[in-house]
Amino acid sequence: MNTKIKTLSAAAALAAALGLAGCAAHSGTNMPMNHGSSGPKSSMMPDASADRNQADIMFSQMMIPHHAQAVEMSEIILAKPDIPAEVTALATRIKDAQAPEIETMTGWLKSWNVPAMMPDHSGHGMSGMVDADGINKLKAAQGTDAARLFLEQMIGHHEGAVDMAQQEIGAGKHPGTIQLSRDVIAAQEAEIAEMKQLLAGL
């Protein structure tokens, strides 16, 4: 499927980007990332003595819109009638966990004096992100069909977040960001298993 191909490509791109960032951090040289015509600001390139590196910055800038979509999807399903209680309970937990994490990452980026999102990256196309058509289908679906679609989409979404978190653990430097990545992996892998069970029971 095209969506799977795009997801795999995005995951590979993220892995490559974070790998380059990690290499730059460990080599002692600041390796600018070219985002089109808008060159990186000097404040976006941490020096060797900083407690974070470019991989940490990229992780937060990409995970914020990723988490924001999970919150949006959860709100969509929570607004619908006739959704199984187990699914609404899961959606509530996802929303309650990821909204504060967005605030935490936004705070880090603000303290580092970098934008909360990469100027040329809306977040769509990243690993696990649901495209506009998928979001519209979720909005239109009702009852069991909506619950099933939510679970299917969120499983892929969580798998993308786990992949991004694993890349950050390997390439990052900031202790808080690395710990958040570990927390994301533990929580979302457990939720993936739970969603697969719920999906099998629908």
Image (tube, rainbow, N blue to C red):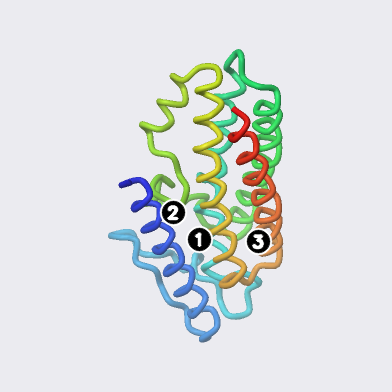
The residue at 50%/70% (across/down) is 45
Q: CA distance from mark 1 to mark 2?
A: 8 Å
Alpha-carbon span between mark 2 and mark 3: 17 Å
User: Which x, y percent locates residue 64?
Assistant: 55, 47
* Pointer 1 local density, CA inside 10 Å: few below 14, some 14–19, many at least 20: many
**Tag on residue 118?**
2
Asked whether the residues under the numbered discs 2 and 3 touch, taking CB atoms below 8 Å apart as contact, a structural biologist would say no
Residue bearing mark 1: 58
Residue pointed to by mark 3: 177
- Residues at marks 3 and 1, CA–CA distance in whole angstroms: 11 Å
Left or right: 2 as drawn, with respect to 24: left
| Vertical comparison of 78 with 25: above or below | above
User: Which one is nearer the viewer's eye here, 120 or 86?
Assistant: 86
Q: Is residue 165 above or below residue 30?
A: above
* Tag 1: amino acid: Met
Q: Position of residue 42 (x, y in %)?
A: 46, 68
Crowd band around label 3 with a 10 angstrom C-alpha radius: few (<14), some (14–19), many (20+): many
> Which residue is drawn at the image coordinates 62% and 39% (left, top)?
195
Residue 58 screen position, x and y as percent = 50, 60
Dots 1, 2 in contact, CB < 8 A:
yes
Q: The disc labelled 3 sits on which kind of residue?
A: Thr
Q: Secondary structure at mark 1?
A: helix
Which label is found at residue 105? none
Q: Of callouts 2 and 3, which one flags the residue occurring earlier in the amino acid sequence? A: 2
| Amino acid type at image mark 2 | Met
